[in-house]
Image (spheres, rainbow, N blue to C red):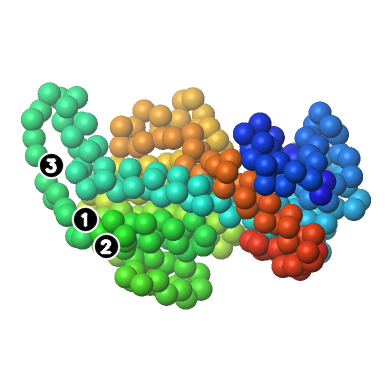
Amino acid sequence: MRLLIAEPLAAEPAFLAELHRLDPAVTAAVWPQDGVPEADILVAFALPPEIERLPTDLRAVFCFGAGVEQLLGDPRLPPHLPVARLLDEGQAQRMLDYVLAAAFARLIDLPVLAEARARRAWILPDGRLDRRDLAVAVLGLGFIGERIATGLRDLGFAVRAWSRQPRTLPGIAAFAGPDGLAACAEGADLLVNVLPATPELKGVLGTRLLQRLAPGAHLVNIGRGSHLPETDLCRALVEGPLAHAWLDVFTPEPPAPDHWIWRDSRVTLTPHLAGVPSPAGAAASLASVIAALRAGDALPGLVRGGRA
């Protein structure tokens, strides 16, 4: 099976070594140094602007990352071409770990303690909660969102979740559809966004939703920067109810050097690190797609197209 890799993370030696361990018959060309040779599978998170043509016998596209909207909306990809997404358990665990860091920080009011330390004040924060009393709302129940919601549940947090289509998960209060979004966020102490970037979800974390949160709530955005209007975020931090925001995604990335967000202690900024694929998990996911393509079976993680 011939691969054309147009994603730097997929060209890293650790990933390629693991992929070849799983499937020694795979050959890989890396763009741009190898140009655009013929290939069966294109591996990319987003097509580089400089790629003007694709291999003529391409059979499938493998999205090397969470979220496929940037590929599905690219006119250079023929609409009949199957697109499969990454199903990486290691990536899911990393994103859960990020959310857990924010959940425990909210649990002990860590930002309040940090501010108090800066003033050399020895205080106990108000409103400390037990895990079972901390209302966590997870927006998005795809491959990643489900693991975040169930991981929080398994550690004793009170979890509710929203998805566009109805879903049922044991021990998790489920909400769905436009009417369920506000109800899911109502009174939440921690709001976790793992939604994809679709036109209807642009600005979903706006004032109307943020005002539903409990006083002192924290926000975690590991979805897309387009979900969070910056003016609404600033208003919610200044006027309430938001006390802290954990932001791993931005539009554009990174924020401009003079952006207010760099200076605001109520915001924890991270450089899009929560969802970095793991070499072992990503290689296993791609290897399963390659095996299915060889066998003529349905591709794991298929989001568009047929069996190829």
Asked whether, in this view, residue 268 is left or right of residue 119, the answer is right
The crowding category of the residue bearing disc 3, from other C-alpha atoms within 10 Å (few below 14, some 14 to 19, many at least 20), is few
- The reply to whether residue 68 is visible in this rendering is no
Badge 2 amino acid: Ala
Where does label 2 land, which residue? 158
The residue indicated by pointer 3 is 125
* Residue 127 horizontal side relative to residue 49, left or right: left
The local secondary structure at tag 3 comes to loop
Coordinates of residue 37 in the picture (x, y in percent): 88, 40
Kind of residue indicated by mark 1: Arg
Residue type pointed to by label 3: Pro
- Mark 3 or 1 closer to N-term? 3
Q: Nearer the viewer, residue 248 or 156?
A: 156
Residue 152, percent from left and from top: 33, 57
Q: Is residue 12 above or below residue 226?
A: above
Question: Which comes before the other along the chain, label 3 or label 2?
Answer: 3
Q: Residues within 10 Å of mark 2 (few under 14, many from 20)?
A: many
Q: Residue at x 48, y 51 (%)?
A: 92
Q: Residue at x 62, y 34 (%)?
A: 14
Report, in whole angstroms, how far the alpha carbon at label 1 lies from the one at label 2. Answer: 7 Å
Q: CA distance from mark 3 to mark 1?
A: 16 Å
* The label number, if any, that marks residue 131 in the structure image: 1
Q: In this rendering, does residue 297 appear at all?
A: yes
Label 1 with label 2: CB-CB less than 8 Å:
yes
Query: Looking at the image, which residue is at 17% across and 54% down?
Result: 130
Q: Name the disc covering residue 29, or none.
A: none
Determine whether label 3 and label 1 are within 8 Å by CB.
no
* Along the line of sight, the residue nearer the viewer: 193 or 45: 45
Measured from the top left, where is residue 33 in percent x and y?
81, 28
